[in-house]
Image (cartoon, rainbow, N blue to C red):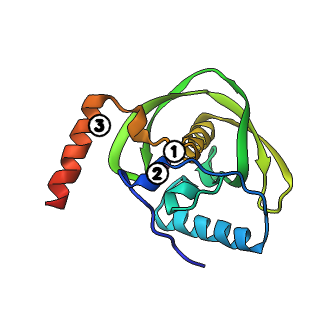
Amino acid sequence: MAVYRIYTYPERILKHKAKEIKNINGGLQEFIDNMYETLHFASGVGLAATQVGKENALFVADVPVGEDKRKIIAVINPVIVESEGESSIEEGCLSVPNFRVKVKRAARIVIKGYDRNGKDLVLEATDLLATVIQHEMDHLNGITLMDHASLLKRDAYIKSLKKESK
Ligand code: NI
């Protein structure tokens, strides 16, 4: 297994749209294992393929859901088929270190896609899991937290990055 480098804002790859995965094979399964490894190494709750520089429509998540329970998922070619309600949680992102912003999302979603073995997958999600999934699907569309931030917040963050690199 391997830990991938996680690309960070403002690296261009984060703006790329992921492409549909046509071939679910051993190579992809190895990639998924490495995505989990990378996610856990970085202590994150979700990771999209575009964050490690691959334009694959795929994300993994490992999210606490209630006491002592976790939902661990890998979803290939995810599509939101139902969404309702509204929820606003302060989010962070492995690709935008030291930055947090509240994002309005649907409170409940149903997604469709494929699991790591290529089997049809339908998943209903609420609360934190719904937020994480929508956040990861944003990544697959080339959208980061920075696109949800106010101009003021974004400018302040860019300034802080410049200071760091000096
Ligand atoms: Ni993120």
Location of mark 2 (residue): 14
Look at the picture and state if 110 lies above or below 2. above
* Element under disc 2: helix
- Real-space CA distance between mark 2 and mark 3, rounded to the nearest whole angstrom: 16 Å
Image coordinates of residue 77 in percent, x first then y, are: 72, 49
Residues tagged 1 and 2 counted as in contact (Cβ below 8 A):
yes
Q: Is residue 140 left or right of residue 8?
A: right
Where, quadrant-wise, is the C terminus in this rendering?
bottom left
124 left or right of 137 in image = right
Q: Residue at x 57, y 42 (%)?
A: 141
Residue 139's spot in the image, x, y percent? 53, 46
Residue at 72 percent of width and 53 percent of height: 76
Q: Is residue 137 above or below residue 95?
A: above
Residue kind at label 2, given as amino acid type: Leu
Which circle's residue, 1 or 2, is located before the other in the chain?
A: 2
List the single residue furthest toward the bottom.
1
Looking at the rendered structure, the kind of residue marked 3 is Arg
Q: Nearer the viewer, mark 3 or mark 1?
A: 1
Q: Is residue 74 visible?
A: yes
- Residue holding disc 3: 154
